[in-house]
Image (cartoon, rainbow, N blue to C red):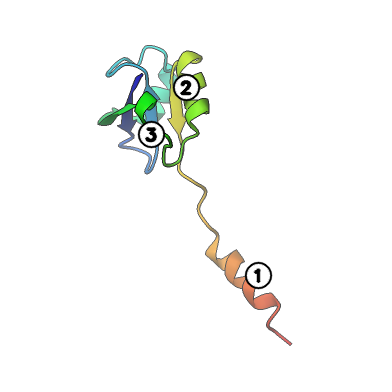
């Protein structure tokens, strides 16, 4: 099974996976408007890949069947101030 991957020009680190290249018929119109004009990134042969970087392969397969696409959002940003405060809260006397 080949999967087409597209990046969003509007949202950093946001990717859209569809089962057929350039076929966005299953993707809701509102999502496409928010996503922007998809930029083709690559085709992935799912059957030949053991793992994917930030996507669970089984969830991706299920999403491609229903609803017919998979949206990968960026990982949450680390709150550096919160991490710094947590690290230093135990060091103060």
What quarter of the picture does the C terminus occupy? bottom right
Nearest-to-viewer mark from 3 and 2: 2
Q: Quadrant of residue 23?
A: top left
Which of the labelled discs sits on residue 15, or is there none?
3
Outermost residue to the right: 93
Q: Residues within 10 Å of mark 3 (few under 14, many from 20)?
A: many
Q: CA distance from mark 3 to mark 1?
A: 33 Å
Q: Earlier in the sequence, mark 3 or mark 2?
A: 3
Q: Quadrant of residue 85?
A: bottom right
Residue in the foreground of this view, choosing between 84 and 20: 20
Which of the labelled discs sits on residue 86, or is there none?
1
Vertical relation: 20 (above or below) 14: above
State the residue at coordinates (43%, 37%): 51
Q: How many marks?
A: 3
Q: Quadrant of residue 64?
A: top left
State the residue at coordinates (63%, 73%): 87
Q: Earlier in the sequence, mark 1 or mark 2?
A: 2
Please state the horizontal and vertical placement of residue 53, each as a whole percent of the image. Answer: 42, 42
Q: Residues within 10 Å of mark 1 (few under 14, many from 20)?
A: few
Please state the horizontal and vertical placement of residue 42, each as a whole percent of the image. Answer: 26, 31
State the residue at coordinates (49%, 46%): 75
What quarter of the picture does the N terminus occupy? top left
Q: Earlier in the sequence, mark 3 or mark 1?
A: 3
Residue in the foreground of this view, choosing between 29 and 22: 22
Vertical relation: 9 (above or below) 87: above
Please state the horizontal and vertical placement of residue 28, each as a whole percent of the image. Answer: 44, 17
Q: Secondary structure at mark 1?
A: helix
Disc 2: which residue: 61
Q: Are marks 1 and 2 in contact (CB under 8 Å)?
A: no
Outermost residue to the bottom: 93
């Amino acid at each position: 099974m080949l999967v087409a991957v597209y990046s969003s020009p509007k949202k950093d680190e946001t990717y859209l996976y569809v089962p057929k290249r350039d076929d966005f018929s299953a993707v809701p119109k509102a999502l496409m408007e928010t996503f922007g004009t998809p930029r083709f990134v690559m085709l992935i042969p799912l059957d030949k890949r053991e793992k994917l970087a930030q996507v669970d392969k089984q969830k991706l397969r299920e999403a491609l069947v229903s609803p017919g696409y998979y949206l990968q959002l960026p990982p949450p940003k680390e709150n550096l101030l919160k991490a710094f405060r947590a690290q230093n809260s135990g060091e103060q006397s």
